[in-house]
Amino acid sequence: MIIRSASFVISNTEVNKCPHPDMPEYAFIGRSNVGKSSLINMLTNHKKLAKTSGKPGKTQLINHFLINEAWYLVDLPGYGYAKTSKSNRKKWSAFIDEYLLTRKNLMNTFILLDSRLAPQKIDLDFMMWCAENQIPFSMIFTKTDKLSKVATQKNIAAYKREMLKYWEEMPTYFITSSVEGTGRDQVLKYIDEVNPL
Ligand code: GDP
């Protein structure tokens, strides 16, 4: 897919204030600082479409971007920094739940995972919650330029082992680097294939 245009539409925390669901949309979510804004900018070829920063936990809004006048790219708030001592309490906001459960035009959710880390409980919990609620998702491993290919594959293998305890097969996944542009074509092609645009 060639990105011809990308523009900001609206930010909010209320699902009923999101744009009218008349075009397919694709959401991106992950723990704060996973590299989500950088990935969105890399995918859309825009340096500043999504705001990047080294500081975790800054965006707590649902951000809609219109791509090619044909589909929405949705930047969801980062999860995982809720101040709670109850380790089994869900750590993503109620409006993320509501958005994922009710948004009719949501074709796929990309769950971003830092390729340098071992499988994290919150990410596994989130993927499990998506599966239980029949929310289609795929995995995006970020920042792979920071590791050797061998180390990246080792971490992905650890994820596969973990996922195969609960899933019959590993969900679709992508290996990306926003610095090097890795995975851009694959993710955009997948978006095209999930719902030909
Ligand atoms: P967000 O909080 O998930 O939106 O994360 P950001 O996109 O703001 O990135 C968090 C930090 O990781 C920033 O310092 C980025 O420069 C850095 N970063 C993000 N993606 C990559 C990547 O692919 N490679 C490298 N080396 N650094 C990255």
Image (cartoon, rainbow, N blue to C red):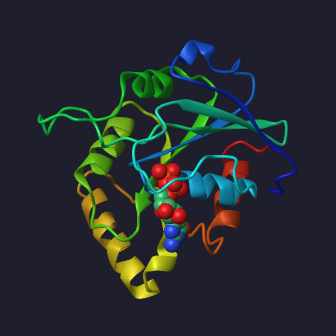
Between 118 and 166, the one lying in front of the other is 118
Report x, y in % for residue 26. Answer: 62, 40
Q: Residue furthest top?
A: 16
- Quadrant for the C terminus, please: top right
Question: With 172 as the anchor, is 40 left or right in this view?
Answer: right
- Is residue 35 shown to the viewer in this render? no
Question: With 118 as the anchor, is 175 left or right in this view?
Answer: right
Between 45 and 136, the one lying in front of the other is 45
- Identity of the residue drawn at 26% across and 56% down: 120
Report x, y in % for residue 100. Answer: 48, 28
Between 179 and 163, the one lying in front of the other is 179
Between 130 and 14, the one lying in front of the other is 14
Q: Quadrant of residue 148?
A: bottom left
Report x, y in % for residue 84. Answer: 18, 34
Question: With 139 as the anchor, is 158 left or right in this view?
Answer: left
Image height of 71 relative to 150, above or below: above
Report x, y in % for residue 159. Answer: 32, 64
- Identity of the residue drawn at 14% across and 39% down: 87
